[in-house]
Amino acid sequence: MKAVDVVIMAAGKGTRMHSSMPKVLQHLGDKALVQHVIDTAKALQARTTVVITGHGAEQVEAALAGQPGLQFVRQMPQLGTGHALQQAAPVLPDDGVTVVLSGDVPLTQADTLQALMDATQGERLALLTLEMDDPTGYGRIVRQADGSVQAIVEHRDASDEQRRIREIYSGIMAVPTRLLLPWLKRLRNDNAQQEYYLTDVVKLAVTDGQSVVAQVLTDPVQVAGVNTPVQLAELERAYQQRRAHALMLQGVRLRDPARFDVRGELTCERDVEIDVNCLFQGRVHLGEGVRIGAHCVLSNVTIAAGAVLQPFTCIEGGTEGVTVGPRAAIGPFARLRPGAQLGADVHVGNFVEIKNSTLADGAKANHLAYLGDATVGERVNYGAGSITANYDGAHKHRTVIEADVHVGSSCVLVAPVTLGAGGTIAGGSTISKNTEPGALTVARGKQVSIPNWKRPTKQKP
């Protein structure tokens, strides 16, 4: 096996995207279009990956910098695809196979490219082609009588007869580098656009008596490019449908695969059920038998077996992550923020927000409550409308609620404070001092009733 060097075309302006961001940095799923292509190069175990930048070069290079094996060359000005490869030629070793990819064609699969490289047999040029019902705008594959490839003719330079050809060049090729480098030197720009076409290497190969083969692809999504926001949205749906299909083959039950989005890494164990319009970001792991209700947004969270998330639950794990224990019941309309760590059989109900807090096994905060920077013991019941006052305007402070405490409704726990095990906090209390284990603590103004009191009335003018 020869070493593989990948060249990624990423110099185009992307005018039709109508965006200040370079086209190849537009996002598909969780990452930039060009990053998908770079990741495919990694899957091929490429020795070197060369990204050719041009328009927005500084932005593209800054966004991709620091990845092992990645090099940048600039194409200034942009004088065609052949001219782009000429800029990369000095950094390509001549002992390998060069695979040419496009930074705006994100969904080519590694096994497709491996088959293309195998087709070179280390001695010939191999092209990835596709038959299209409407090939307008694409370079046509012109074959000889024996079926071998004779040339690629760009649409604008094609004759009427050639334009009737349905087989098109995808923009992806694999070629032994020792053959490619001299062909690049011989490219000319005597065409309608006065550009140096990489596709002209086919004619040069034929002239030199080298064989040119074509691998016909039957999956158009793998070579679909992005030039407009409409195409980006269409490819996003195709990308999500593929991910949905892969999960269902593993046994995940998706209520509607068309209403499902993963923008990161989602892993699932057996018998997971996911309802419609859920969004998964970052790294999400769902344990066996987890059920996710409709319209949930989950980011950087691990959810243990048997847990149930009711609709409209939002989990934002951030860099710290969130964990949800076995058989926990969350939502609807609950919000878990970074650092939330929930034990087994925990209940977090509607309009409850938890941040940087641990809830031990069996703890419950069923509605309308806030727990921030808190340590909550086993079997604690946290009442509706209660909050931890964890921020003094300059620093965060921690609240400790020991096991079996009952916190009544509408309480304010002013941190730092510890509630002793088994204690009860009367509803409406503001607690600013530690409480004794097992005690009832009441901290509120004495109720006063004034008989026969009359409310003020407005005076008539």
Image (cartoon, rainbow, N blue to C red):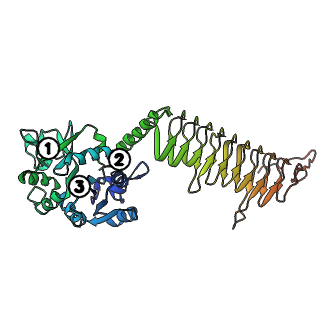
The disc placed on residue 97 is: 3
Q: Eyeballing the image, is 297 above or below 11?
A: above
Residue carrying label 1: 141
x%, y% of residue 264? Answer: 47, 48
x%, y% of residue 346? Answer: 70, 42
| Residue 121 is at least partly visible in this image | yes
Type of the residue with mark 3: Val
Chain-order first, disc 2 or disc 3: 3
Measured in 3D between alpha carbons, the distance from the residue under mark 2 to the one under mark 3, in whole angstroms, is 30 Å
Mark in front: 1 vs 2? 1
Left or right: 346, with 409 as reference point: left
Tell me what residue is drawn at x 87 percent, y 54 percent: 443
The disc placed on residue 232 is: 2
Chain-order first, disc 1 or disc 2: 1
The disc placed on residue 326 is: none
Q: Eyeballing the image, is 284 above or below 258?
A: below
